[in-house]
Amino acid sequence: MGELIVGELIVGELIVGELIVGKLIVGELIVSDLIVRELIVGEIIMGELMVGELIVGEIILSELIVSELIGELIVDDLIVDDLIVGELNVGELIVGDLIVRDIILGELIVGDLIMCDLIVVIVAELIVGEFIVDDLIMGNLIMGELFVDELIVSELIVGEFIVGELIVVEFIVGEVIVCEFIVCELIVDEFIIGEPVVGELIVSDLIGRAPPEFPCLTDMDPDRISYLPGHVIDQILSHLSIKEAVKTSVLSSKWRYKWATLPNLVFDNQFVSAAVQDHMIVKNKLLRTVDHVLLLHSGPINKFKLSHRDLLGVTDIDRWTLHVSRKAVKEFVLEIWKGQRYKIHSCLYCCQSLTHLELFNCWLKPPSTFKGFKNLTSLDLQHVTLAQDAFENLISSCPVLERLTLMNFDGFTHLNIDTPNLLFFDIGGKFEDISFENTFQLAVVSIGLYVNFEINQSRLRGGYSNLLKFFVNLPHLQRLEIQSYFLKYLAAGIVPINLPRPCIDLSYLSIRINLNDLKEISAALCLLRSSPNLQELEILISVGDLGVSEMVAIVNCDGMQARQEEQTLTITHNYCWEDVFFSCPEMHMRNVKIDGISGIKPELDFISFLLLHCPVLERMTVIPVSNMGTELMKQLLRCRRASRQAEIIYLDP
C-alpha cells in the first residue's frame, strides 16, 4: 500500500482469497470471549510466525500441509471444541520447544493450509470461550493492550491480505479505540466502533499519513529511549520484575528482546496473579509463564527463585531445575508453601556453580556420588527433611560456606557444625545436642530450641557443662541470640562462674530467660561476667513451668539464692541479687531492652541490679507483658542508677 485515506468504511462482507504474512510475532493476547462460527481459509502462506499465547474457540480448515517438524513447541492447555484433521503434511515447521500438558479435542476440520516457514516460540494458553493475556507483541505487529468483551463473527472468508507493519496502542472491542495504527504507510489516528454488528464493520476515521510525520516509540522514529547504551538498559531492567521487563519490549527493537537476557529470574506471588481466586488457574498460568520465560531466555542465569503458594504437586520443577543447572545458575531458591516435602532432583547436587542455595519444605536425599558444593557460600534450609549422615556430609563438604540457616528440620537431632569459614549461623528447631568444631571465624549466632530441654542425668557426670562445650570453639563471637528453650540447654550441668576464655568480641547479647529458673539465671550471669565488652543487652522474659505455690513464693521472697549443684535448685527468702552478683565486675552496656515483664519481684530486682552495675548505661527500654498502669513505672523510677545519663523508657505493650 502506498497511501490510503478513508473517511468512512462500511463492509458488509469481507472475502479474501489469499493471506500472506511476512513475519508475525505474538507476545500476549487478551480476549474475554471469542466466538467464531465458521472460519474458511483458502490458502495461507506465512514466512515466519512466532506466537506467545493463543486461545481459539473453534477452528475449521480445509487442509493443513506441513512437511517437516523440528524442535519443541510448548503448549500448556489446548482446548478445542471441535477438532477434525483431514490431512496434515508439514512443509517446514521450526519450533523451539513442544511440551503439551492437556489437549482436549472435540472436532477439527482441516482442508488446505500451506506454510513456508513457521517458527513458533511458545503457545502459552489456549482456552475455549475465554482468552486473557496482558500484552500482545508482534515482530511487525505490536499491540499495547487488547481487550475484547465479546467478538462474534458469522462468516469470514479471506482472499488476499498483505500487512507490512501494524502497531496498535489500545484496542477495545465493544468500543474500539486505536491511538496509532500503522500499516506500511497507513496510519490510523482514530479508529472507533460504536457497537460491533455481525457482518458489518463501521470505521469512523481512517487516515493515512507518512510515518515520519507521526511521533511514536518505534524504529521508524527513534527517540532517546532507543538510543540508550546497552549497559544503561541492562541497569534499568535489573530494577524491574520479569513481568515489568517483558513490557519494555514495545519501546523499540533495541529493547524488544533485552528482557530475555535478565540474569535474575524471580517467580513469586507478585509475578503471577489471577482475576479470580481459582488456584488451578493461577497454577496453570504460573507453569506457562515459567516455561515461556525459560524458553525465550538467553545468556547466563545468576539467580532462579520459585516461590508460590500454588506449587503443590508441580512435577515441572524437576525440569526447570535441570534447565537452570545447565545454565550454571549461582543462586537457587525453591519455596514450596504447601503440601508434602518436595524431593529435590538429583541434578541439583551436581551444580557446582551454586553460591547460594535456599530450600523451603523440601526433602534432601543427596546421591552417593555427591561431592559437596565447592563454591557454596550461603545455605538456607527451612522445613526440610534430611538424614543425619546426609546433613553431616553436606555441611562438611562445603569448604567456603559462610552463612548457614537451619529452621524446622527433621531427620537429624545431633548437630556438629564443622565449617572453618562460617561467619553466620542461624538455627531454630528440635534437636538434642549441638557442638562446633573449627568455627574460629564464626561471628554471628542465633539459636532457638523449640522443645523444653530435659536434662539427661547420665550426661551430668564428671563436671559436664553445655556452656563450656558450646563456647569453646567460638572465640570471635560478636553477636549472640539465645531464643526459646536454648538457655535451659546451656544451663545443663554445672554452670561455671565465668567461662575459661572470655568473649572479648561479644558486643550484642539477646537472651530469652525464665527469671524464676535459677539455673537459667546462673547461665545468663556467667555470660554477662564473661563478656567484658558487651554494649547491648536484650532480655525477653519467658513464662516458666512453676506451679502456683512456687510462683507465690517467688513473688513474696526478699531475694533468691542459686545453689550450683548438679540437679537441685532451691528458692529461699534470705538471699539477694547483690550476693548473686558478688563477683561481677562493672558492665559496659550502653543499651538494655527488657521485654515481657509482669512486675514480679525477681524481675524488678534484676532490673535494679543492672542499673546499679552499668555506669555507662544510656538507655533502658522496658516493655511489660500487659498494660500495668503507672505503678510499675513508679517502681522503676525509684531504682538507683550508676549512670547519671541513663534514662528509662517505658513502652506500652
Image (tube, rainbow, N blue to C red):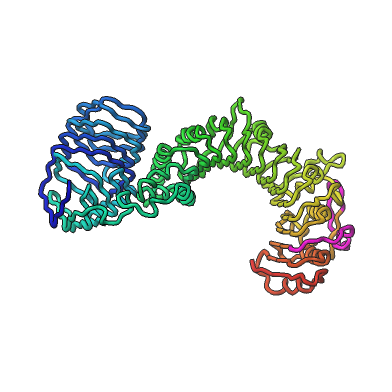
The image shows residue 116, relative to residue 459, as above or below, that is: above
Total marks placed: 0
Residue 585 drawn in magenta = yes
User: Where on the picture, by quarter, is residue 538?
Assistant: bottom right
Residue 569 drawn in magenta = yes
Where is residue 397 shown, x and y percent of the image? 66, 32
Residue at 73% x, 70% y: name it: 648
Q: Name the quarter where the C terminus is drawn.
A: bottom right
The image shows residue 602, relative to residue 442, as above or below, that is: below
Q: Is residue 240 visible?
A: no
Residue at 30% x, 48% y: name it: 142
Where is residue 406 shown, x and y percent of the image? 64, 43
Q: Is residue 232 visible?
A: yes
The stretch of residues the image draws in magenta is 563-591
* Left or right side of 506 for 297: left
User: Where on the picture, by quarter, is residue 157?
Assistant: top left
* Left or right side of 20 for 536: right
User: Where on the picture, by quarter, is residue 472?
Assistant: top right
Depth order, front residue of 459/287 = 287
Depth order, front residue of 124/239 = 239
Depth order, front residue of 270/168 = 168
Where is residue 55 shown, x and y percent of the image? 28, 42
Where is residue 439 shown, x and y percent of the image? 74, 41
Dominant secondary-structure state across the stretch colored magenta = loop
Residue at 68% x, 65% y: name it: 623
Depth order, front residue of 125/546 = 125
